[in-house]
Image (cartoon, rainbow, N blue to C red):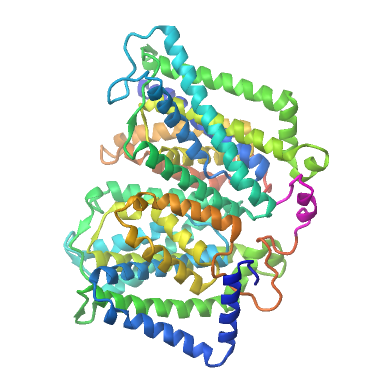
Amino acid sequence: MKTGNKFSDWFTQKYDALERQPYGRIVVPTVTLLAFALIPMFVKSNYWIRVLDSAGIYIMMALGLNIILGYTGLLNLGYAAYYAIGAYMWAILGSPYFGIHWNFWVVFFLAGLAAGVAGYLLAIPGLGLKGDYLALVTIGFGESIRILANNLKLTNAAMGISQIDPMTIGPFKATSVQHYYYVLLVICVIEVILMRRLENSRIGHAWMAVREDELAAESMGLDTHNLKLLACFIGAIPAGMAGVMFAAMQTYVSPVSFKFVESITIVAMVIVGGRANVYGAVLGALLLVVVPEPLRGSIFDSARILIYGLLLIVMMLYKPQGFWPRRYRGKSHVKGNNGGLDLSGKKISDSKTSVGG
Amino acid sequence: MSMLLQQLVNGFTVGCLYALLAIGYSMVYGVLKMVNFAHGELFMLGPMFALFLMRVLGILQGRLNMLPADLTGGQIAGILLLSLIGGAAFSAIIGVLMERTVYRPLRNHNASWEIAMIAAMGVSLALQNATMLIFGHQQKGFPSIIKTKYFSVGGASFSNMQLFILAFVVFLLIFLYYLVNKTYMGRCFRAVALDRCAAGLMGVNVNAVIVFVFILGPAIGAASGVLYAMTYGQVYYLMGMTVGMKGWIAAIIGGIGSIQGSVVGGFILGVLEVIGAGYLPLITGGEMGAEYRNIFAFIMLIVFLLVRPQGLFGKRGVR
């Protein structure tokens, strides 16, 4: 797909050619994986490993949101709420606050399920009539979860819950940031593989068909409503799991970590990286976590949201598909996002009356 | 009983302000078929700028931004007018800038609604953060310009502020009714709302109508913001987010795109929300208090979306 950007075109072309080679499919992922696995050998500072850990958590979430926003084209602006659900589940079920200490991995999958169910239930009213209703419903849900966490006794109100148990694998207890790094790396790799499988499956293609042209998809016999509900369900699962990882890593959760800004950051990751592309989402998450890090404490830190906002505007104006969008085999049929049927478009808007859209 | 009456009065006042906000959402939705995500920020910028104006003119004194006690009635009216018009004008300018720099190029690219929505979200974040950088991140006192007097009718106490808000809103609604139904621009607006493409082909200057909407909507929103800040005595850079969301919810309850629907939706949301927040501590024995007010608005949204997704005044099946 031509994006108009020279570097981007060159890169996707080269990458395409590489991936078409039989060795490319094996060599490129292996080299990348090795590079990531070797990072803790060379980066000795715990600080930067911690940054990469949080990048890993964001990658988990960006991949999840990519299903909702990237493949299916639904705007979910309360994604941090699912993250909060996961984090608080581990905080409650694995800390001295109630004296409950469950197995980490049981809660890990339970939290994923809980987040998925929340996503599914929210989508029922949200998908009612118009696409933009889901955006409002999810914002409202995100705010509500935060307010609840801020006031309920269950979550220890604004004080948050501390001394949360670390992650355990059998008898092994994760104590250092390096341990979390490797566990997160494994989880992210598994998630990337699953997402790749998903996007090339029948459901993945159906999601993209719904995004491109809902009417056409429906007339092809797809149950678009159920597909969207499914996207909201599956897309929320990684967020719950990421929340559990977050709580275990930080050993402390409080409502401050789940503000609206958090949801926006995850949306920005998917948008900047490239919608509907697994690697794009990974890239976006890495970029938006690692790049602002050296600026911490400077004037840019307080202006971070301003920069995100401007970034979103500029991206939408000039590169709405992101830096590393999904490539479509065969002839590109993507133009804007209206599918092929755009009768009200070009001709009239060229003559300066600007209708359509 | 007197408590219910009191809640009704308070709810009605807040409802007036939500209604004004909802009108802005509805008008933009009417012509662009897109929710202006940044409308809440325009609501917040109104009182922010009004406060700035009052500071610059040296009207305020003290750290809490108090008005001098010895103002005459004429001076008070002048300050009131200044802050309302100043705030509205500033928001209208920002609104038009927003339209010209972001929404119009997107329209020319034929962008889909979710792209427009994400861009609008970007505008909202940028405005919010810029306001924080310029005016600071703490909540600021806003003078309740009118000298507040209370008088009670049937057990409920009214303030003259509430009466003023009510009168102002009624005046604005009449003005708006005239503008939309009796003037040329209003007729163009209705035509564009009905069918943008056809209206353009009939010779209506679509872009002019959109600019008109982006002047009127933000101006009304900002005026509502100034009244809100006067009522609650403070402005805050995040205020546009929470209150703006309620305006949006009100617009959906009334049926987005319909102006009279927005007004009714605003009143319903305001009254139900205040009553809910008022009775929640009584029902739960003080366990849950007014801090759950925002959740109440959200629950109402969910209920309305499940029961009547097209809104009270919306037509079924209209996308």
Instruction: Out of B79 and B319, give the one closest to the viewer.
Output: B79
Quadrant of res A78:
bottom left
Tell me if residue A181 comes above or below residue A214 in the rendering.
Answer: below
Q: Which of A237 and B130 is in front in this view?
A: B130
The residue that appears at 54% across and 70% down in the rendered structure is A324
Q: Is residue B312 above or below residue A258?
A: above
**Image quadrant in which you'd find residue B179:** top right
Q: Which of B283 and A40 is in front in this view?
A: A40
**Percent from the top left, x then y, of residue B42?**
50, 36
Residue B213 shown left or right of residue A314 in the figure: right
Residue with the most extreme right position: B202
Instruction: Answer whether residue A122 is magenta in the image.
Output: no
A244 shown above or below A295: below
Q: Is residue A103 left or right of residue B89?
A: left
Residue A97 percent coordinates (x, y): 18, 59
Rendered location of residue A122, percent (x, y): 48, 56
- Residue B237, visible in the rendered structure: no
Please tell me which residue is depicted at 71% across the width and 40% down the height of the picture.
B207
Q: From the viewer's perspective, is A166 left or right of B125?
A: left
Which stretch appears magenta?
A342-357
Which part of the image, by quadrant, shows the N terminus of chain A? bottom right
Name the dominant secondary structure of the magenta segment. Answer: loop
Tell me which residue sits at (49%, 44%) in the image. B301
Vertical placement of residue B22 versus B10, above or below: below
B17 relative to A34 in the view: left or right? right
**Of residues A338 and A161, the one drawn nearer to the viewer in this rendering:** A338
Q: Can residue A186 be seen in this view?
A: yes
Q: Can you give x and y, in whole percent of width and height, for residue B270 in the image? A: 46, 32
